[in-house]
Amino acid sequence: MWRASTLNSEHLQTVTAVIGVGINLAWHPEDLGRPATHLAEHGPQVSPETMLGHLAEAAQHWLAEWNCGAEFARVRRAWLERAGPAGEACTVDTGSERITGTFVDLDPSGALVIRDGHGRQRTVTFGDVALAAPQGVS
């Protein structure tokens, strides 16, 4: 969990962001149905503690770029440049439902837009997102 504070003309505003990520340092699963790797396979031997420090720095950078939402469009553009392609299969588990479909977009508010198995476009604001194996890969 990271906290960012900004001072505006009226008061100090604190925003808390909870972000879940996984970084393969020394091992990766083989049965994902998509390419995967781990950092040690490419040379660097990094401890979890060291990687956490790097991750914290990167998170602080992007929280500053985000600027409590004022610059979200910039973060959205960067995210979409790095995201998988539109049409990529995914599932979202919201806790009350599991939506299976394909990635469409990240809307201007930051919500995930997917097309479900019935062809309906859905906007999802929370949940565990998993990418599905590409077609033809088991």
Image: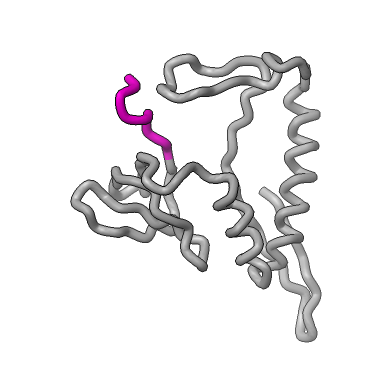
Q: Position of residue 10 (x, y in %)?
A: 76, 85
Residue 32 image-quadrant placement: top left
Q: Residue furthest left?
A: 118
Residue at image location 42% in from the left, 48% down from the top: 86
Residue 100 vertical placement versus 4 (above, below): above
Q: Position of residue 9 (x, y in %)?
A: 79, 85
Residue 67 vertical placement versus 50 (above, below): below
| In this rendering, position of residue 116 left or right of residue 18 | left
Viewer-proximal residue among 97 and 37: 37
The coloring applied to the image is: one colour
| In this rendering, position of residue 104 left or right of residue 21 | left
Viewer-proximal residue among 34 and 68: 34
Marks counted in the figure total 0
Residue 111 vertical placement versus 96 (above, below): below
Quadrant assignment for the C terminus: top left
Residue 51 image-quadrant placement: top right
Residue 42 image-quadrant placement: top right
Q: Position of residue 7 (x, y in %)?
A: 80, 75
Magenta segment: 130-138
Characterize the magenta stretch by its predominant secondary structure.
Answer: loop
Q: Is residue 131 magenta?
A: yes
Residue at image location 72% in from the left, 48% down from the top: 59
| In this rendering, position of residue 117 left or right of residue 73 | left
Residue at image location 28% in from the left, 48% down from the top: 97
Q: Is residue 104 magenta?
A: no
Q: Position of residue 13 (x, y in %)?
A: 72, 72
